[in-house]
Image (spheres, rainbow, N blue to C red):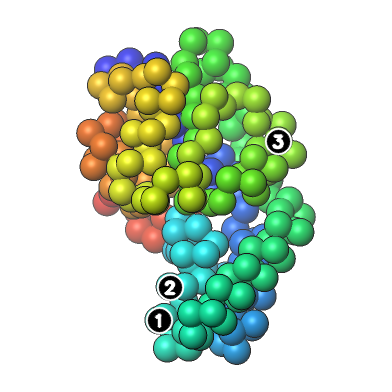
Amino acid sequence: MRATTIIFDVDGTLVDSAADIHSALNYGLALAGCDGIDFESSLRLVGLGLEGTLETVLADRGCSPEMQELVRVKSECAAYYDAHLVEQTRLYAGVKETLEALRRAGAMLGICTNKRPEPTRRILSALGIGDHFGVVIARGTLAQNKPHPAPLLAAIRALGGQCNSAAMVGDSLVDIECARAAGVAAIAVTYGYSDRPIGEL
């Protein structure tokens, strides 16, 4: 198969953003009166997006606040993250060159992420790769998030692509399950934040 439409995850795939996300996550946990999480543990949850990770950790620790308070905590956590987006976040080695090569080869490129739209676009722009992508499907673009196939299918449609000539590139089980559910080829990078060896995905 020759993939002419290639959709990318962001965190752990294009950018190493774990340190900034970890800082924001611990800020949110502190707001909720919950103990912080260590860096390695937070890595396994990055694919859920900051809000999803925060909710998961709070629930796992039995310290979920009431709904109104949860909304406030999530909002302030997101605001903290937005103010510190690229303090430690960097492109992975070879990403820029790979995107440029794919564009030269005629591929249509898009983003499918569980990150919110605004920080996604700001990070891609700040790191010099935003212009490579014809569409950004992010948290809140649709009612569903990855691993539901709807966001990936929407990204492919927006680029005028077809599932039988598309691929999803990611670093975690969330990405692989999303691709499988959409009937799209899955490509797993050998780095990133997967909580298990890539060969097991």
Quadrant housing the N terminus? top left
Q: In this view, does 130 lie above or below 115?
A: above
> Quick one: SS at disc 1?
helix
Q: In this view, does 196 lie to the left or right of 58?
A: left
Question: According to the image, label 3 marks what residue?
Answer: 125
Q: In this view, does 138 lie above or below 27?
A: above
Q: In this view, does 184 lie to the left or right of 9?
A: left
Work out whether mark 3 precedes mark 2 in sequence or the reverse, and give the earlier one.
2
Are the residues flagged by discs 1 and 2 in contact, CB closer than 8 Å? Answer: yes
Question: Label 3 vs label 2: CA separation?
Answer: 29 Å
Q: In this view, does 39 lie above or below 16?
A: below
Q: In the image shown, does 56 or 138 lie closer to the viewer?
A: 138
The extreme top residue here reads 105
Q: Is residue 160 above or below residue 38?
A: above
> Quick one: SS at disc 2?
helix
Q: Can residue 91 be seen in this view?
A: no
Neighbours of disc 3 within 10 Å: few (<14), some (14-19), many (20+): few
Question: According to the image, label 2 marks what residue?
Answer: 56
Percent position of residue 16, x then y: 60, 49
Question: According to the image, label 1 marks what residue?
Answer: 60
Q: In the image shown, does 154 or 50 lie closer to the viewer?
A: 154
Q: Is residue 106 visible?
A: yes
